[in-house]
Image (spheres, grey):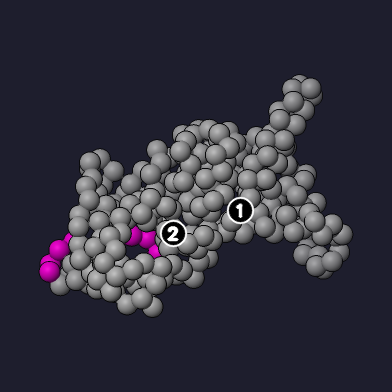
Amino acid sequence: MKLTLKVWRQDNTQDKGRFETHQVVANEHMSFLEMMDVLNESLIAEKKVPVAFEHDCREGICGTCNMVINGRPHGPQKGTTVCQLHMRAFKDGDTIVIEPWRATAFPVIKDLVVDRSAFDRIIEAGGYISVNTGQAQDANAIPIEKDLSSQAFDAATCIGCGACVAACPNGSAMLFTSAKVAHLGLLPQGKVESSKRVQSMVSQMDEEGFGLCSNTGACEAECPKEISIVNIAMLNREYMSSVLGSKVTV
């Protein structure tokens, strides 16, 4: 299949950036990243600079394959990362527009590579459990309701790719932050620090320059792991309860 690619090229954060048009021949059984490899091989053969893009596991686990494809983070298939997107999702003769995540908090490093270290700093602010629990306990030592454990597991599937931020018209990181708050705060081991955690992570999220959530639902629609916006409601409740509780105790 013959495709026309319009790829965003940007030398660094200060560069204005521009689209470049390239022709590529791909096999329908290729993954999208394999198609990008073919493009780069042809550019290198022509002694041109290859397109910079991120990847690691190529198994839909790590979340580094961040691209906006035809206006949609991770492309047209629901619940799919770019590395798991295959060329059979496109037709012969298609034009594909490929861009990086667009968000103030995710500055472009080069081409399709953005700096997502803001997410790391949100995790550092409170996305952990520091309670001394001693040696590892048996799996069933602490009784946990099935509904709670299922909700925590669903939230924990977030891979931190940033598609929610790229999809949000406000560039909000609420889905990501709420998933991290939920998967720890729902379990007994994480409840001890839940109040401090939610305040610290929300404060860091605001400091990083992410936008406010206006409940458009675009984050949930484009999330490759289909994280629910129910977690955002949970975060809001936890945050209000934590802030009001803190004020009462002062």
Instruction: Look at mark 2 in the image and give the residue it sits on.
Output: 76
Q: Can you give x and y, in whole percent of width and height, for residue 79 in the image?
A: 54, 61
* Identity of the residue drawn at 57% across and 49% down: 220
SS category of the residue bearing label 2: loop
Instruction: Look at mark 1 in the image and give the residue it sits on.
Output: 227
* Identity of the residue drawn at 63% across and 45% down: 229
Q: Quadrant of residue 201?
A: top right
Drawn side of residue 160 relative to residue 179, left or right: left
| For discs 2 and 1, the disc positioned in front in the rendered view | 2
Range covered by the magenta-colored residues: 46-55
Name the amino acid type tagged 2: Pro
Q: Can you give x and y, in whole percent of width and height, for residue 6 in the image?
A: 25, 56
Name the amino acid type tagged 1: Ile
Taking depth in this image into account, of 68 and 198 the one nearest to the observer is: 68
Q: Is residue 242 visible?
A: no
Q: Can you give x and y, in whole percent of width and height, for residue 33 in the image?
A: 36, 68
| Mark 1 crowdedness (10 Å alpha carbons): few <14, some 14-19, many ≥20 | many
> What secondary structure prevails in the magenta region?
loop
Drawn side of residue 218 relative to residue 31, left or right: right
